[in-house]
Image: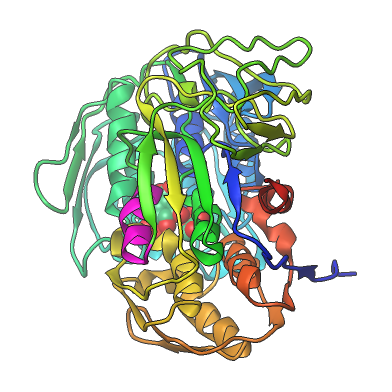
Amino acid sequence: MPAPHWPAPTATTPVTAIVPLPGSKSVTNRALLLAALADGPGVVRQALRSRDADLMVAALRALGTTLTPMRETSAGVDWQVTPGPIRGGAHIDVGLAGTVMRFVPPVAALADGPVSFDGDPHARKRPMGPILDALRALGARIDNDALPFTISGPLAGGEVTLDASGSSQFVSGLLLAAARFEKGITIRHVGPPVPSLPHIEMTIEMLRAVGVRVDAGERDVWRVEPGPIAARDMTVEPDLSNAAPFLAAALVTGGTVTIPAWPLHTTQAGDALRDLLTTMGATVTRTPAHSTSPATTAAGVDATTAGSDPTATGSGATATGSGATAADLGTAAMGSGATATVSGTTTTGSGTTTTGSGTTTTGSGTTSTGPGTTDLVVTGTGHITGIDADLRDVGELTPTIAALAALASTPSRIRGVSHLRGHETDRLAALATEINRLGGDAEETDDGLIIRPRRLHGGTFHSYDDHRMATAGAVIGLAVPGVEVENIATTAKTLPEFVQMWTAMLEAR
Ligand SMILES: O=C(O)C1=C[C@@H](OP(=O)(O)O)[C@@H](O)[C@H](O)C1
Ligand SMILES: C=C(OP(=O)(O)O)C(=O)O
């Protein structure tokens, strides 16, 4: 029996909350895969625990990697990763995870036997053709052009031309494993512009951090030299794209939301929120590293932090740890794929202590930041301005921006995101349908959405098994009484604790 719809809470007062976030899906799944291909045992710290990350762990195990949890805290899981020979005969469930369906097949093509892949019903509809054709051109045999398929090596590598306008993950997937191909790889993109270029940057930065030589000097051409992938101790940044709905709550309610441990340098798409939310009427500031509860020391927990400001600067804010959130994310923010070894790492347990300075923590939230991060503070007025934006580089932010646009007082146009039709669902169709179902005025265009101001009413907001559709419904529900989100549990794809975090944010004072 399907779970009942989730009544999205309406905010009655401005939110004032500190929301530490767990690790980035994109960084976690790259770090795990690179560790599995490395030349010795390595560590991935503060990795996200979520459906997509669990699917990556299961896939790598099936292919012969040993992944052992060393420690699990609210900050995520620290994995000891011991590579093994890549084993054939495995079956990989990709779920609905783009990072698993596009990043793992190039690894499977290195196995000593065939590997089969399948996923959720909708995963069979997500584009796979260009990466499967590229793998064929590089030597692999594959029996289909979409999921389900079986892939067999060997894969020599070499030069390949593909159209990556449907997903940057076609390029990232090939680049991540390419150092292990006999000839490495040269990829040439031919076609309409490649979306999500910062995600390809993330791939390149993380490859370079493990000693792989990557040449990305020419537009739409990427070259990876064959060679070893170094085993490292990597730490995962907080998920800035998952900050989007929480930061949006500041705009909708005229409140303030603080995200600790926002990296000063990052390739994550979510960093674009700083500009996007400013354009929509928010004030966005960075403040020095924040420690939500420096005196908090849960049993068995070392509350010493590395490089953090030991003074609480809560200014009346409340942390909404809710057990889901990262502790000491500052040390998680040493750059995506950073090869730094964490020092002075702090973790939190579930104990909570309220401390002075007007700062309250709820749940298990001891958060501190280390070098290279600040707090990100977003304050709204309750009045949202529409936006005209090309989101091609940061398409995964579209559902939140569209939800804000549906509540804005001036029209919005979102451009450059036709590739969203191949995401977890056709996000352009889904957003237009669901906003209009609530009485809104949203129109699909070839490459985006036009959303005009119109008063919304309550009703069901369908999620289409898409985590970001579900959180978009929650954002609209803050301002519109009676919104019920169908299948809120789908947020487990990247943020299993979404409901608890959202509730804690709204209860924080
Ligand atoms: O490489 C990655 O981690 C991702 C790349 C992007 O995919 P597309 O280029 O298909 O949009 C992004 O939307 C997705 O959420 C994660
Ligand atoms: C497009 C997304 O995910 P995936 O990694 O499954 O492509 C997303 O998270 O917005």
Q: Position of residue 298 (x, y in %)?
A: 75, 16
Q: Position of residue 288 (x, y in %)?
A: 39, 28
Q: What residue do we see at 49% from left, 79% from top?
A: 406
Magenta part of the chain: 270-281
Q: Report x, y in % for residue 267.
A: 32, 41
* Residue occupying the point 38% across, 59% down: 277
Q: Quadrant of residue 307?
A: top left
Q: Give the vertical position of 166 relative to 308 (above or below).
A: below
Residue drawn at (33%, 59%) of the image? 278
* Viewer-closest of 252 and 187: 252
Q: Choose between 209 and 401: the one closer to the eye.
A: 401
Residue sitting nearer the eye, 356 or 484 = 356
**Lateral position of residue 443 relative to residue 274, left or right:** right
Q: x, y (%) of residue 84? A: 54, 20
Q: Which of the image's four quarters has the N terminus?
A: bottom right
Write the residue at 55% across / 79% down.
Answer: 430
Numbered-mark total: 0
Determine the image quadrant of residue 366.
top right
Point out the quarter of the image occupied by ligand 1.
bottom left
Q: Is residue 101 visible?
A: no
Res. 175 visible in picture? yes
Is 338 in the magenta? no
- Please indicate whether residue 15 sits to the left or right of residue 237 in the image: right
Q: Please name the colour scheme applied to the rendered image.
A: rainbow
Query: What secondary structure do most residues of the magenta stretch adopt?
Result: helix
